[in-house]
Amino acid sequence: MWVLVALTACRQARSKSAGTDGSPAVDSVYVPRYAKGFRITYRSDSVRLVDIQEPTKADAPVEHFALIPHGQQANDIPQDYTIIRTPVRRIVCMTTPQLKAFSLMDAYDCVVATSDTRRMQNPEWLARLDDERVKRIGIEGNFNTEIVMATNPELILVSPHRRGGYEVLAETGAPLMPYWAFNETSALGLSEWIRLSGLLIGKEPEAIALFAGMEREYNYWKAVASKAERRPTVMSGELRAGHWYVPGGQSFYARLFADAGADYFYKDDPRTGGVILDFETVYARAHDVEFWRVMNGFPGTFTYEALEASDKRYADFRAFRERKVIYCNLEYEPLYENMAGIPHILLKDMIKAMHPELLPDYEPQFYRRLE
């Protein structure tokens, strides 16, 4: 992966000499502290070169974008860079986590269309969808290209880890930029993509400040969790259509559990995404695990009785018997649409569930111990 070159928030200028290979003059390069999927090169002529790569694959292809201010000539741009004029004012988003960056920066007007609106609860986005200031373009793999083209987008943020079908969107002529935030391996890595969103719309200083606040809060509570006298074990997921989906040992949730002062039951697994297991494998490794994270969309009040009704074998797990299930009901909790902006809150929720003595007065917001 890329070598880190430190960059202060004010981006103080460095030497402005051209590279020995004739490349354009460069002031500095920013490689995120947590996100692994992008880096930004700050050129002295206000051009920003953005390199984007799948975060968990060092040998994955890199896509290149040159962000050039409106009205400025595109001089000395490397041949394989796609030009994007900034600030971008008409963006199509594919997921609610992408939308979160724009709501945090009060940049609702920059989004003209979106795909993923299921379970959305943000009142401003709902109002804009209702009056069609933001268009619904259909689900991935079945986009309404006529609607997309009618919005005259300047940029389309795609989510390569989902179902895809983006080829048809190339007909719009707008650049397609991969947004790999959800493939990051840490909560802070996911959230750090707000910096790229801010750069696109001319609000990078605001984005830097927002993320700095998340980082400060997260690391503070991580330090609090490190003071726990013991590290309980935790499992994750549930059976769906006969398969048990668990986060890999190097995944976003595995890191979150570790930072909350717990040992994830599958932490030795090298994978970063979801892993499909059968019941017998999970039971063999997790029947005596102390805590169990469950997340689903359940109409009504989810209970231990409802959990057991979905599969009677669940009652054999220690976490079930001891009533230590940590639960988020997606039917009512807007987790996904807020996740990019709440790494510190997710961490506090997990600490409260597994180490309540460390946060005696804290009221969880998304994940709670199931009553």
Image: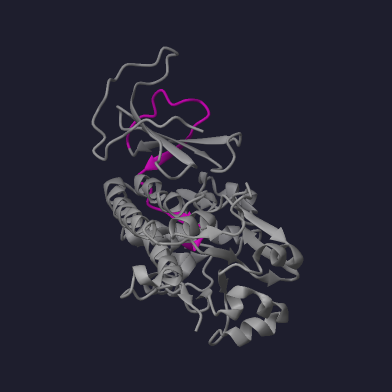
Query: Seen from this angle, which residue lies furthest front?
Result: 229
Residue 144 vs residue 238, the one in the foreground: 238
Left or right: residue 32 compared with residue 292:
left
Main secondary structure of the magenta stretch: loop
Range shown magenta: 71-96
- Residue pictured at 56% horizontal, 53% vertical: 251
User: Measured from the top left, where is residue 110 in percent x and y?
Assistant: 38, 56
Locate residue 59, reporting x and y percent: 61, 34
Left or right: residue 286 compared with residue 37? right
Does residue 151 appear anywhere in the picture?
no
Q: Position of residue 26 (x, y in %)?
A: 35, 24
Picture colour scheme? one colour
Residue 72 shown in magenta:
yes
Position of 243 relative to 273 (above/below):
below
Q: 64 or 331, which lies in front?
A: 331
Write down the quadrant of residue 45 in the picture.
top left
Query: Which residue corresponds to the image point at 59% horizontal and 40% vertical from the top-left?
Result: 57
Furthest residue to the top? 20
327 and 336: which is toward the camera: 327
Pick the front one: 313 or 102 = 313
Q: Residue visible at 53% across and 87% down? A: 301
In the displayed structure, 115 sits above or below 43; it is below
Res. 251 in view: yes
Give the residue at x 63% y 69%. 288
Toward which corner of the image does residue 229 lie, by quadrant? bottom left
Q: Is residue 105 magenta?
A: no
Residue 313 is left or right of residue 46, and the answer is right
Q: Is residue 357 above or below residue 272?
A: below
